[in-house]
Amino acid sequence: VKSINHIGIIMDGNGRWAQARRRPRTYGHIKGATVAKNIISYCAENKIKFLTLYAFSTENWLRPKNEVTFLMMLLKRHLQKEVRSLVKQNIRFTVIGNLEQLPDDVVEIIKQTEQATNRNTGLNLTFAVNYGSRQEITNAAKEIAKRVLQNDLKLEEIDESCFNSALQTYPFPSPDLIIRTSGEYRLSNFMLWQSAYSELFFSDVLWPDFTRYDLEDILSSYLTRERRFGKIETVRSESINTRN
Ligand code: IPE
Ligand code: IPE
Ligand code: MG
């Protein structure tokens, strides 16, 4: 794979995958976690610098309590089990999203995993957990307003770069491509600011069936796309991968 800087993935379709097998939705989440693990390793092996996985949205609290509890437990168990392997793969793990509403034991494991991997220099792996881009953008606006009120920032100094640095994804670059599985064509509150010029890919494959070969197909298709960023000369994706 040529150097692709940042991939974002909306991992969708776990529930339908399980239901098609007459199993509880939670069974799909377990299989989905295994797929995530494989895709993470693929990205680490192939020198991708940033991978952001949408694991739980601010809207996912509206699901039945037992499913929410199960997802939290799964995240905790997954991180506990994988932390050593993350270190071995030189992966640096971080989380974006509102951690305040998460159960204490989950927050604890997240912090431990971030801490244990924070010297790693390979893949930057970000889990979006209790993440919602509208909330992220609202909080950024609030933060900036506060700095203006405190006279730490002048109104004229508010520009895109200032706003960008108030987002949770800062200082990571914007995703070059965003993939959504399961045949749904929407972003569901994922990286709304950051996706302004991302290439979007929608796959019909349900997340538990998604393989590194599906990812390779998408990546080779990405490399044929022309990213113009509003200009008229054509810029091949592979030659602009250093910009945000
Ligand atoms: C994605 O799969 C995982 C999460 C949102 C946590 P879903 O659970 O949304 O599966 P479907 O979309 O209902 O099939
Ligand atoms: C988006 O999937 C959130 C995650 C993948 C974590 P959803 O299944 O929650 O999205 P909608 O409800 O279909 O838009
Ligand atoms: Mg879904």
Image: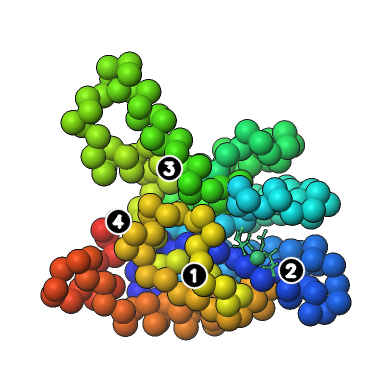
Q: Which residue is mark 4?
A: 244
Tally the numbered discs: 4
Q: Residue at x 48, y 46 (%)?
A: 134
Q: Earlier in the sequence, mark 3 or mark 1?
A: 3
Quadrant of ligand 1: it is bottom right
Q: Mark 3 falls on what kind of element?
A: helix
The answer, for residue 134, to whether it is visible in the render is: yes
Q: Is residue 118 above or below residue 241?
A: above
User: Outermost residue, left direction?
Assistant: 233
Residue for badge 2: 15
Question: Are the residues flagged by discs 3 and 4 in contact, CB closer than 8 Å?
Answer: no
Q: Secondary structure at mark 1?
A: strand
- Residue under pointer 3: 137
Comparing labels 3 and 4, the label whose residue is closer to the camera:
3
Which residue is at a point 55% across and 43% down the rendered structure image? 97
x then y, percent, for residue 187: 50, 62
Percent from the top left, x then y, of residue 185?
51, 72
- C-alpha distance separating marks 3 and 1: 21 Å
Asked if marks 2 and 4 touch (Cβ < 8 Å), the reply is: no
Where is mark 1, residue-wise?
A: 179
Left or right, residue 149 beside residue 117: left
Please identify the quadrant where the C terminus is shown.
Answer: bottom left
Is residue 43 at all visible to an observer of this figure? no
Q: Residue at x 33, y 43 (%)?
A: 164
Q: How is the image coloured?
A: rainbow
Q: Is residue 137 left or right of residue 205?
A: left
Marks 3 and 4 sit apart, C-alpha to C-alpha, by 18 Å
Mark in front: 2 vs 4 = 2
- Residue 20: x, y in percent? 79, 80
Tell which of 119 and 67 is nearer to you.
67
Quadrant in the picture for residue 113: top right
